[in-house]
Structure formats: C-alpha cells, structure tokens
Amino acid sequence: MQLGAESRNKTIAAISLMVVALVLAAVRFFPDSPAAAKSPAPAVTPSPGVRQKVVGKVRTGKQVPLNTENSLDPTLRYNWLKASEDIKYQGTGRNIFRAQVEIPKAIAKVQVPAPLPVPQGPPPPPPINLKFFGFANKPGEPKKIFLSQGEDVFIAGEGDIVDRRYKILHITPVSVEVEDVLNNNRQSIPLSQG
C-alpha cells in the first residue's frame, strides 16, 4: 500500500493541516508550553485590606501596572465591601421586598356643572315616503292616482287609505295632499316625472 500515491498535493495539504491542529491543541491544553508564552497573562498577588497593583507582562518582558477598576481580578476587595456597608438605602419609600403594590389614593376630581339642556320642541314628524307619479281617469268616475313606496305601487282616490297609514285628502293636477294618520302629519306630494 502506498500512502499518498494518488495525489501528492492533497497529501501535503492534509499533513500541514494536522501540524496546525496539533499546535493549536498544545496551546489550548498546555498553557505553559513555549507556544503559549506569546500572550500576556496578568500576575496577581492578593493581599487583603490593601489596595494592590495588578501587574501584567508585555512582550518585552517588562512588568506594567494594569488598571484594577477594569480588571477581571476575582480576589475579594475588603475596602470596597467596607465602603458598601456604610451606604444607607434611600428609595422612594416603597418596600422593595413586598410583592403587593400599594394602590395610590384617588385624587378628588373637580366636578364641572354640565350645561343645562336647552328644551327643544317635539321632534318633527317623519316624512311621508310616497311618490306621486300618475293619474288613472275614466270619464264619469272619481280621480284616481298612482303612488309608489319603494317597489310597491298603490292606486288610490280621494278619501282612500294607502299602506294602512296614509289617507289621500285632495287630488290636484300637479300634487296630492296626504295625511299620515299615525302621526297626524299632513304633506303635499308633487307630481314626479319618470
């Protein structure tokens, strides 16, 4: 069996990728290895009660002080704890440890007197919805007219009641006088064309 005899370029690429993977694994799992020495690591010397300086190494090997306010140093700072003990909570007066919310007291509303309603007369009677659109005259008989309401057509003479509500009072050649017997309302309906 010949390993890599099919394609020399593929074999070289696979070997180089394996070398890179081994170097990355060595840096990840063995941080004290020579490959991991390139990155700076902060050196911490904890001393309780005293503010300490955090020192880090730079590429040249010199130790440089780092800012302790922004560092991720996990040591306990007793001076910060002491300063926080002296702080008194001054809230809005609400107990933050109660689950119930205090209901605010209602503010008394000023009542403005409503303007008095102006008395109006009785509402106008509903209009008569009949349309006068023609005559039906025979010699020697009383005048008859054609009235319509929507799709309904009525034939009536003077004194007749149409649609159980409207009484025909007087017929003229240009209009008809009709009375609404339910509302006691009289109206003159003109002759309409078409």
Image (spheres, rainbow, N blue to C red):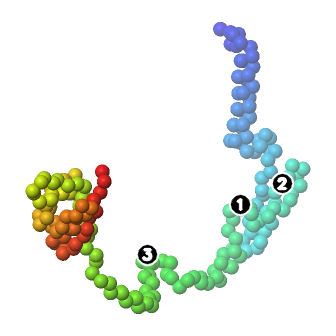
Identify which residue is drawn at 71% across, 12% down.
7
| Residue at image mark 2 | 57
Q: Is residue 168 left or right of residue 116?
A: left
Residue 74 image position (x, y, % from top left): 68, 62
Is residue 154 visible in the rendered image? The answer is: no
Looking at the picture, which amino acid does disc 3 mark?
A: Ala
Residue 137 image position (x, y, % from top left): 15, 54
| Mark 2 element type | strand
Q: Is residue 52 left or right of residue 89?
A: right
| Residue at image mark 1 | 72
Reading the chain from its start, which is encountered first: label 2 or label 1?
2
Looking at the picture, which amino acid does disc 2 mark?
A: Lys
Identify which residue is drawn at 16% across, 72% down.
182
Tag in front: 1 or 3: 3
Q: Residues within 10 Å of mark 2 (few under 14, many from 20)?
A: some
Is residue 25 visible in the rendered image? The answer is: yes
Quarter of the image with the N terminus is top right
In this rendering, the answer to whether 17 lies above or below 144 is above
Identify which residue is drawn at 71% across, 76% down.
79
Residue 2 image position (x, y, % from top left): 68, 9
Q: Badges 2 and 1: C-beta atoms under 8 Å apart?
A: no
Reading the chain from its start, which is encountered first: label 1 or label 3?
1
Quadrant assignment, res 76? bottom right
